[in-house]
């Protein structure tokens, strides 16, 4: 018998795991275009301009009769989307852990978000309420889908591989974002040559992100596989199914109290990631409205972020292997604080300094997020991945509510985007202090997981 043709069970298992990992990367490839083109670049300034077109003489719109400054509407919509996500994610996470059937839930969330994003093609004139509604649906759906996607990480990667696998996933996402932004830039800057108005070009860019999301989501849905759910105590499944969103979230937090160090890390993450996500979602508004930069300049800046974020994610993954994930994340938070403080002093009408700021963000953006995800995966008790990642996802990738709310309120009270952007520094300072106090090796052991040699 030819021994070269004989494959060991361990070899088959490793190949199957690598196949799942490659499929898993492609969900970042699919949905990151939404985060980049829609949330980070186009929708903020465009929805703000639509709201301004609908505003009264004092610059206010009145959704449901509530006076809202037009410049704050986008930030408030981001914040509202998280409230919706908080109601939905615990139910979906508990259902995924209870049944072991994550893929159908992932498909439902992904295609709900993709459909809402594609529907942004119809956002024109003064339809700011339509834009807000589609944004809330798309953001909430993305939060649910990302929670399920992230919960696969401890199942498809052993502890020693997670930093690298998580970093590659983020790198895939930023590579896709960069590729589509190049296409967006060609369409937007050449819209007259294509016979399109500027608004139509923006709407096509928004809708194409939804089509991209839906098309490439097919790859992970084919390659990822569901696992058998662990046995539960009699009666627990029915009880969990009957819980409302708030009660299920409370049940998850109560369970986390049995793992206080996991909860301590999650608290630190929620704080500093609020700052990260608010910078991502509001940077284009800041550049457009405060610094007076054109849409083409903003696209180039975000494209620069995407390209450098790929290298940054991979480089910080290597740093984590040498110095540990916790130390590397702490270093990134220092860099975030300095970058944000510098952003406050950027002169208006100076694209080059905005590009320098974008470069600093890009170098730390991907790595700080990827390493946070992989570090948290070590702290999740086995069998509760989706449930715990539902709490984690509350503040992930543009779903944070407190940061956008603070940004919107600061602008509403002061009328200054500079004051709004500098108000976010506290998230990074407090997040650093909270994370520095978490003994991660003991936290991993207390969760019942093997402790990597370096973490």
Image (tube, rainbow, N blue to C red):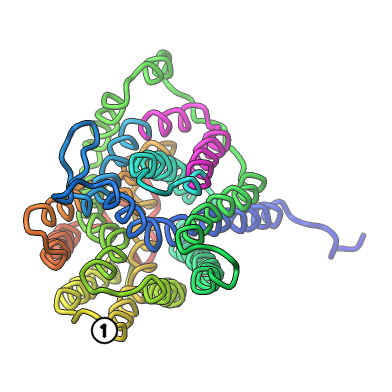
Q: Viewer-proximal residue, 45 or 317?
A: 45
Tell me: residue 233, above or below residue 172.
Answer: above
Tell me: residue 95, above or below residue 234.
Answer: below
Using the rendered image of the protein, determine whether residue 321 is visible from the camera's viewpoint.
no
Q: Viewer-proximal residue, 217 or 260?
A: 217
Residue tagged 1? 350
Residue 101 in the magenta stretch? The answer is: yes
Residue found at the far front of this picture: 57
- Residue 189 image point, x, y percent: 49, 74
Q: Viewer-proximal residue, 15 or 43?
A: 43
Q: Is residue 146 left or right of residue 255?
A: right
Q: Residue at x 56, y 69 (%)?
A: 183
- Residue 46 image point, x, y percent: 36, 57
Q: Viewer-proximal residue, 67 or 422?
A: 67
Kindly report the secondary structure that dominates the magenta region of the rendered protein.
helix
The magenta region covers 89-118
Q: Residue at x 55, y 40 (%)?
A: 111
- Residue 157 image point, x, y percent: 52, 55
- Residue 85 image point, x, y percent: 34, 37
Tell me: residue 388, above or below residue 423.
Answer: above
Tell me: residue 198, above or below residue 124.
Answer: below
Q: Residue at x 53, y 41 (%)?
A: 115
Q: Residue at x 20, y 73 (%)?
A: 334
């Amino acid at each position: 018998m030819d021994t070269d043709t004989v494959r060991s069970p361990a070899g088959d298992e490793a190949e199957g795991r690598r196949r799942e990992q490659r499929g898993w990367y492609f969900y970042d490839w699919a949905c990151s275009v939404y985060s980049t083109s829609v949330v980070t670049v186009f929708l903020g300034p465009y929805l703000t301009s639509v709201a301004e077109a609908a505003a009264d003489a004092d610059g206010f719109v009145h959704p449901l009769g509530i006076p809202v400054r037009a410049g704050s509407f986008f930030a408030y919509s981001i914040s509202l989307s998280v409230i919706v996500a908080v109601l939905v994610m615990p139910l979906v996470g508990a259902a995924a852990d209870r049944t072991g059937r994550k893929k159908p839930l992932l498909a439902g969330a992904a295609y709900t978000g993709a459909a809402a994003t594609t529907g942004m093609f119809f956002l024109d004139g003064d339809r700011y309420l339509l834009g807000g509604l589609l944004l809330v649906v798309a953001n909430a759906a993305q939060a649910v889908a990302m929670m399920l996607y992230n919960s696969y990480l401890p199942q498809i990667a052993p502890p020693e591989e997670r930093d690298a696998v998580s970093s590659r996933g983020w790198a895939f996402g930023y590579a896709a974002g960069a590729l589509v932004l190049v296409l967006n830039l060609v369409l937007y800057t050449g819209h007259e040559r294509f016979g399109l108005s500027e608004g139509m070009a923006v709407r096509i860019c928004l809708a194409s992100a939804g089509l991209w999301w839906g098309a490439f989501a097919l790859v992970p849905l084919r390659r990822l596989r569901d696992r058998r759910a662990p046995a539960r105590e009699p009666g627990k499944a029915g009880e969990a199914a009957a819980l409302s969103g708030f009660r299920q979230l409370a049940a998850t937090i109560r369970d986390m109290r049995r793992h206080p160090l996991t909860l301590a890390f999650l608290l630190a993450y929620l704080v500093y990631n609020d700052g990260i996500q608010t910078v991502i979602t509001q940077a284009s508004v800041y550049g457009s409205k405060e610094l007076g930069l054109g849409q083409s300049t903003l696209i180039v800046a975000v494209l620069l972020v995407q390209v450098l974020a790929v290298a940054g994610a991979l480089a910080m993954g290597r740093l984590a292997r040498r110095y540990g994930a916790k130390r590397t994340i702490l270093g990134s938070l220092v860099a975030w604080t300095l970058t944000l403080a510098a952003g406050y002093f950027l002169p208006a009408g100076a694209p080059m300094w905005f590009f320098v700021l974008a470069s600093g963000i890009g170098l730390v953006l991907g790595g700080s997020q990827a390493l946070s995800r992989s570090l948290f995966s070590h702290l999740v008790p086995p069998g509760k991945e989706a449930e715990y990642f539902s709490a984690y996802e509350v503040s992930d990738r543009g779903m944070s509510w407190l940061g956008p709310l603070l940004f919107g309120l600061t602008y509403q009270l002061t009328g200054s985007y500079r004051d709004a952007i500098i108000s976010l520094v506290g998230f990074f300072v407090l997040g650093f202090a909270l994370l520095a106090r978490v003994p991660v090796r003991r936290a991993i052991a207390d969760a019942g997981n093997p402790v990597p040699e370096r973490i």
